[in-house]
Image (cartoon, helix red, strand yellow):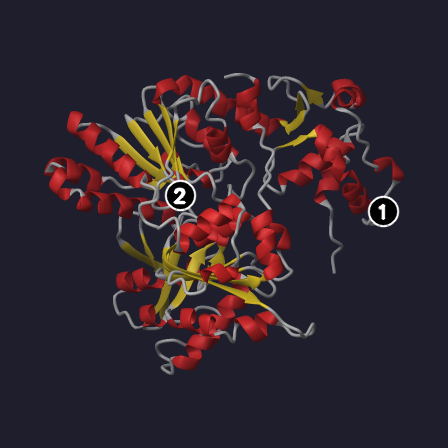
Amino acid sequence: MAEAIDVHRVFAEYFRGCEGLAYALSSKLAEGNICIDIENYKEDLPYLLEKQKARPGYKDEYTIFWPSAEEFEKQCNQGKYVSHSSGELKPFIIQGKKAYLHRYYQYETQIIDNIKRLGKNFHIITGGPGTGKTFSIGSRLVEEFTRNPGLRVALAAPTGKASARMNEALKEFAGKQADKIEEAVKAKITDLKAQTIHRLLGFKKDSVFFNYDEKNRLPFDMLIVDECSMVDGSLMAKLLNAVDGNTNLWLIGDKDQLASVEAGSVFGDLCRAEKSAVLNGKVDTKVKNWRFDPDKGIGRLSREVIEGRFSGADSYSGDEKVTIVILESDNKKENLFREKVLKSEYFRQYASLYQEYIYKESVKEALASLNKVRFLCVTRENDYSVAEVNKAVEKYLRSIIRDNERFNPREGFYHNQPVIITKNDYNLRVFNGDVGLIRKEGDTFLAWFETTEGEIRNIPAGYLNHYDTVFAMTVHKSQGSEFENVFVLLPEKQGEKLLTRELLYTGITRAKEKVVVMTTGDSLHKCIEMTVSRASGLEQRFRNENL
């Protein structure tokens, strides 16, 4: 068995004299951070030291030192690795008491400079589900198309699923407003087709660069980007680089959702810096919820979670929309997941809902039915995970569906297997987060997907390289999606460091009709108490530089 490697330490050892800085930044990068607060982060020094000492081959000379911010510059080989300017090609940048990896400091700088360049053409709309974000954008499109029928408009989102939902939301808006909108304007709105940001920018195969950039900007009068909380610092910088100065740019999202998996929390930082000179008046925060009653059900629960003032599981007893199940056991040896979760009536009820898609002959109808329900987990492995819940749902469905031709889970592909793509494949035109359905035709397994344009296409299932079964998915993967019924499962032990109120809020707000939250009391309280802390530096730079 190969020995585990502490990649952060390996990285740090390249930088003699500032191993501590390098180690801290590298380790924090894995958590989505792109900078650290030098003065405050020293509180984690004992943890870092113990982590280093636990590794084989520990040597005293690699011990992390932790001087003041001023001493860093002096001790880091007289500035060999550290600069105060993004123009210097050095690995690290120190600005005040903040330490950055150079690359991400540059992305922040590009974001700031581009927002300044766009000026009055830069806009943000933020709010939770049901607060009217789509109505605001739809109304803006009606106004703009009425004034200028030839307006060039583009829609984009981070994932294919989010793009498809954007299309659906605008079609729904146009339908509800049909008697108030001219037919020509309605046609303009419904003809718009959202695409992924990568497709919008024109991805280059085997490259981190795009066809559209600061030298070749996007040819649109208006660009609307949805689910921006999912966009990391690197992608946001490249997107803004490609936006023409005359383009009206609208960034839409929920600042309270989980930040991007990759480094940065750009959208949240921009919303929190709304009082800075450049962003003042550019952030429209929607509060009133038109979908959920704020005093009961999903509306109440999501509000209490994100505000960190949960009133207790008992207060939701009798609620038609929300069920909170607290797992308890007097037997320390009892496996709560296997004995309580999988044997619960709630689990069986939600698993049973998947029967509907299996009996749909039309692939399009089956995909629509499949996406009415989802189990949401925190981790991918061990108990309470995506892998275990997928197996349990397959087993339960197999016990109630006796037709082997219709549903018979096995190794490899099987008929009516739901799958989710886990990595972009530009050749196959399938992207991370796309949900599809495996069906057997003759001796061939085909994978069916719905495009952002609402069309159904298939590819041989054997061509898929990166996929998982998707009765369950992680909360992170669920961003950009909505389901009628959602079952949120929080782990008892594994993944506890991931338990935050933003994660729980995101999981809860994927539900349009009903949500079940099943967890232990301790895990639930951890979620409520813990907030995501990302030191991206962007918010503070807006404030400090008085932009």
- Tell me if I can see residue 194 in this picture: yes
Image spot of residue 79 (x, y percent):
74, 19
| Front residue of 353 and 511 | 511
Using residue 527 as the reference point, say whether residue 117 is left or right of it.
Answer: left
**Residue 447 appears in the picture as rendered:** no
The quadrant the N terminus occupies is bottom right
Residue 391, numbered label? none
Q: Residues within 10 Å of mark 1 (few under 14, many from 20)?
A: few
Q: Are marks 1 and 2 in contact (CB under 8 Å)?
A: no
The spot of residue 197 in percent (x, y) is 39, 38
Element on which disc 1 rests: loop
Which amino acid type corresponds to the residue marked 2 in the rendered image? Gly
In the rendered view, tell whether residue 373 sits above or below residue 207. below
Q: Is residue 83 above or below residue 308?
A: above
Q: Residues within 10 Å of mark 2 (few under 14, many from 20)?
A: many
Task: Name the residue that disc number 1 marks.
Answer: 57
Q: Looking at the image, is 119 positioned above or below residue 362? A: above
> Where is mark 2, residue-wise?
128
Q: How many marks?
A: 2
User: What residue sits 50% from the left and 17% below the top?
Assistant: 547
Percent position of residue 492, x then y:
62, 62
Q: State the image quarter where residue 539 is shown.
A: top right
Seen at 43% across and 25% down, the residue is 241
> Which residue: 73% across, 37% down?
23
Residue located 84% across and 37% down the image = 63
User: For the residues marked 1 and 2, what is the alpha-carbon distance in whole angstroms?
Assistant: 49 Å
- 15 horizontally vs 504: left or right: right
Q: Secondary structure at mark 2?
A: loop
Residue 521 point in image, percent of width and height: 59, 61
Q: Is residue 71 toward the left or the right of residue 228 in the image?
A: right
Q: Earlier in the sequence, mark 1 or mark 2?
A: 1
